[in-house]
Each structure stands twice: as structure tokens, then as C-alpha cells.
Amino acid sequence: MKQSFVTTFAHAKINLALAVLGIRDDGYHELQSVMQSIDLHDVVRVRRAGEKVTCHCGELSGSGNIAHIAAELFLQELGLSEGVEIHIEKHIPIQAGLAGGSSDAAATLRLLNKLFDNPLTKKTLLELAGKCGADVAFCLGGGTMWAAGRGEELDFLPKAPCLDLVLVKPRAGVNTREAYQRFDRDGRSGFLVRADWENALRESSPQQIAALLYNDLEIASIPLVPEISDLKQQLLAEKCYGALMSGSGSCVFGIAQSGEHARQVAEKLKNRGHKNVWVTKTADHESM
């Protein structure tokens, strides 16, 4: 059976804050994070077709793509063996700390549930998302959320104000596993105060939010990609309210003073030879 495609956006995320508390008994890291969806997005199209799952995503095509894994888990949950065809138009860079793959997987789960007339509850979708990867559960709905555990324990925070953002990614990416290994050797665990974030978000002040930006993994990722530190300093020198590496990197974002300021900063970065630069803004929660 072959049907028409259904389509959705798969929004990237940034970590406004990320603290690594230590290693859990299951081998994963215990985290605290303030996660935020942004407008930068991939486009995901899914339809029922053929007899197996196929995933088309340029060089990232095939069974190793996390969206492919998500589709197989969805079909297994329903006890089905029919085919699903996935097409992903990539705009979110890889190895950037922006959850591009996780967002594609989450979008695939949302679309499949729609295609099959919503057989799975939100709880079950979140369980499947957790099997795909730590960030997939957040990407199912997105918005502004407090994350704990491996990143799958999620609670809503006050909605962030519209933040104008400049994103810039070094040529090199960061392997997440390697970043955590370096953190275990060289890093020092921090801690986030949730009440501080709730207050800053309720105030809707970009300056207050910028003052709380925090990422324990910067100290581990900068030796892997030293350009991260330089880009962060360039964003601050251009009068962004704050700048931070997202996730395990290598992408760095700056909170601009306005949309026009963001465009001006981005243009200056491009003129200095930086090719991977985006102007974007925060995005709202999506319905599942």
C-alpha cells in the first residue's frame, strides 16, 4: 500500500543551560538542562509504502539513521510488518549539539502516529522516543523545558520570550561520546537552580536569560575544536547579550539584541570567512 506523504518540520534545539552531575549506575550521565526549540529545522516527509522501512537523507540515508530506527520501533509497537518511506531534507548541521537527528526521529514518530490514525498515546510515544535517544523525547513537543535524568525526564518551564539568535558552527563537529569521555577526565560537575531559570523566563528578559547561560561540556569540547572558544568571543565582542556552545557542540549561539542585530552579526561572521552561520529565533511547543 502506497499513500501520499505527510510532512512536518523537525526543529533544532539549543541548550540554554547544561549541567553534568555525574555518571549513573546505568553508565549514562545524570544531567540538568534548560532546553529550547528554535526555528532552524529539517523537513520530514513520511508515507506508508512498500514492505520495509526506507530512509532517504543524502549521506545519512539507511538503517543507521535515527529516524529509521524510530519508524521500526513504531511498527514493532503496533505489531505491523508493512513498509514506511521517510524523506528528510536536512538543514540542521550534524555534530553540532542541535539535536538534528533526534528531531528527525521525533518528527517521524509524530507523522507515523498521524498516518496510522493516532494509535499510540503520548506516554507510549515518549517511551519509544526514549529508546531512540535522550533528546528525542524533548523534540516530540519541544518548546521551553527543564530536562533531568539522561534528558528524558521533562517538565515545562515558563515559555521563553522570542530570542533573536545567531548560530555559527566551526568546520569540525564534536563527537558526543568523546566530549563526555573528556569531561569525565577533565571536567567539573556543576548544578542548575531551576527557580533562577523560572524567574528569568517569567521576566521575559533576554539579558537575565543570557546571564544564566551555562554549559559544563564546553571545557571538554573546546580542546577538541578550539574554534568554539574563538567564535564565542566573537559573538560577545559583537555585543550579543550572551553566547554559549549548545549541547556537546560544536555549534555556538549568541543571543542578539534584535533581529536586525542578529543579521548584522551574522553578516560580519560570514565576511570573516565563517560559512556555517544562521539567523534564527526561539520556537514554541508543538502538539503531539
Image (tube, grey):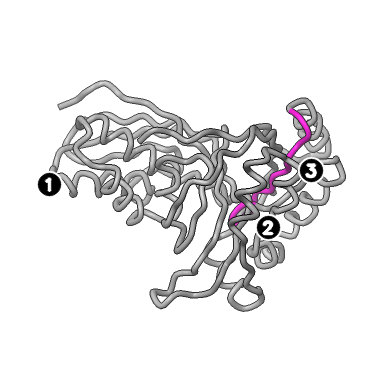
- Give the labeled residue for mark 1: 79
Q: Is residue 257 magenta?
A: yes
Q: Position of residue 162 (x, y in %)?
A: 64, 32
- 251 left or right, relative to 230: left
Q: Nearer the viewer, residue 231 or 49?
A: 231
Secondary-structure class at tag 1: loop
Q: Is residue 277 magenta?
A: no
Dominant SS in magenta: loop
Identified by mark 3, the residue type is Tyr
Which numbered disc, 2 or 1, marks the residue that appears first in the sequence? 1
Secondary-structure class at tag 3: loop
**Residue placed at 18% from the left, 49% from the top?**
76
Q: CA distance from mark 1 to mark 3?
A: 51 Å
Choose mark 2 or mark 1, whichever is in front.
Answer: 2
Please give the range of residues in magenta.
246-258
Label 1 Cα crowd, 10 Å radius (few <14 / some 14-19 / many 20+): few
Which numbered disc, 3 or 2, marks the residue that appears first in the sequence? 2
